[in-house]
Amino acid sequence: MPRNDVTDAHRHPDITSMRGRHRGAGGATWWRLTVMRLGWLADRWPPRLPSKGDLLAGPSVALVLIPQSLAYAELAGVPPERGLYTAAAAPAIAAISGSSRYLQSGPVALTSLLAMGALAPLMATGTAEYAAHAALLAVLVGIVRVLLGLLRGGALSYLMSQPVLAGFTVGAAILIVASQVPTLLGVPSDADNPLTAAWHAVLTPAGWQPGPIVLGIATIAILLGGRKLHALFPGALIATVLGVLVATAGFGGPQVGAIPAGLPLPSLDLPWPAVGSLVLPAVVIALVGFAEPAAIARRYAAQENETWNPNREFFGQGVANLASGLMTGYPVGGSFSRTALNKLSGATSRWSAVLTGGWVLALLPLAPLLSGLPTAVLAGLVIAAAVSLVEVRPFREYWRLSLPQFGVAVPTLLATLLLAPRMERAVLLGVGLAIAVHLWRELRVDVERWLEDDTLHLRPRGVLYFGSAPDAERQIRAALNESPEIHQLVLHLDGIGRLDVTGVLALRNLLDRLALDGVDVHLDHVAPNAQRLVDRVLR
């Protein structure tokens, strides 16, 4: 393992002993301890000098990121240069302050769609007001993630159930594709819901423009076909260059338009009065959008047998969003495709992402050369990226293994489509369904029974708490009524996952009644964490 990527477990001793060592020291502030818990910059940056692989991976990813940033800016509804500013600011900041040494952060399709969904109902896309609110949204997302990282809220990355994520992701991918259909066909639409806009464009063949259709389909073919040829195939770069050449040759379709050169100075001049209307979308984006970088970081950490710190990743993604917002960008996340390209290009450390941001920054003066890029090429880039988000296999598994989870995934998908552009409502609906399914399962306690002479054995399986105690008591009483001749009852509690006060009180009521009937009761295999409660209630 390279020196700069020694895991937190090796660099940082147990936090308990750390507290003991620093207790009473004047400099051991809460902030310092928090930073040490996160394994932050103090001893992780700078690493050793970049390797040859890092030097190659940096520009390789940058040449893909630049056209993608224009495409995702179009998807998010902000001017194209805002995508470039985001691409210049986010990768290096996320790499320095995050947990993964391979993760490439920046503009991504899913987060761009979520940003559009949060802002489009409030104002017209593409305006200066809209772009300012997008920057504010990025700052709010950053604040939420930074706080979650500092407060050790990384466990929240596991609380969004897989059926909810699967349903929302597929629904979002369909919306992403639908949002690009009008651009691909050359038929503009003012509809809020991307499905409505796509349907209108498809049903207006008189307005179809052959040029954008050919360019868009060619772009999709280059990207999807190139992936099958080789993982390092520079499809986005090739499609962009071809698009610029076609435009130079006189292509008359819609183009990106003027792109200013350079990078703006960081600014706090944001529409702060709008914070109240953007807090809920920011929280949703912070949590849902984190699923992608978290999955990427976990995957590559597992491959390299390294430790992944979700708290630090939350923090790193938060700082990246703060930087993006202050640079007039919009919310960012982690990219599967660019991270894979980064790894395959030979990246060995965080230097690769730092160099990616540096290359984007260095190439910003050349950005005006892309002003003639046909928007159909950007539509093709977005569609090709969205296709990779569509996975049918999880739905098949839910159908085969758990119908209740299937019943969470499908409604979440449908809600995502129907409630667009307010997709945060679909996420909340999915989370509500997942909680309802969980509670429904928790209410059920199965009681296994068998007889040995005059002894009845019962083994409840489930969680014995205030919600399930009545059902468990009913089943136990029914088993006793079916065996009136018994003189002894053995309750095996090793199948109880959790036991609360209400559950223990229900047991006490049962024991009191059985004592009056002359039945001896024995509790067997009480979990250690419940033994103290049982002793206190039943003594």
Image (spheres, rainbow, N blue to C red):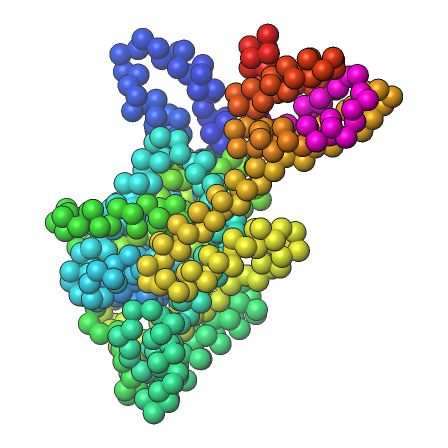
Looking at the image, residue 26 lies above or below residue 355:
above
Quadrant, the N terminus: top right
Q: Residue at x 20, y 66 (%)?
A: 124
- Looking at the picture, how far across and down is residue 380, in whole percent? 40, 73
- Residue interval drawn in magenta: 476-500
Give the farthest residue toward the bottom: 206
Q: Residue at x 35, y 54 (%)?
A: 424
Q: Is residue 476 left or right of residue 241?
A: right
Q: Residue at x 36, y 58 (%)?
A: 423
Give the farthest residue toward the right: 453
Residue 511 picture quarter? top right
Looking at the image, residue 2 lies above or below residue 354:
above
Q: Is residue 276 left or right of residue 469?
A: left
Q: Residue at x 48, y 52 (%)?
A: 165
Looking at the image, residue 288 lies above or below residue 377:
above
- Looking at the picture, how far across and down is residue 341, in whole percent? 48, 57
Residue 305 picture quarter? top right
- Looking at the picture, how far across and down is residue 131, in whole percent? 20, 59
User: Is residue 345 among what the camera can see?
Assistant: no
Quadrant, the C terminus: top right
208 is within the stretch colored magenta: no
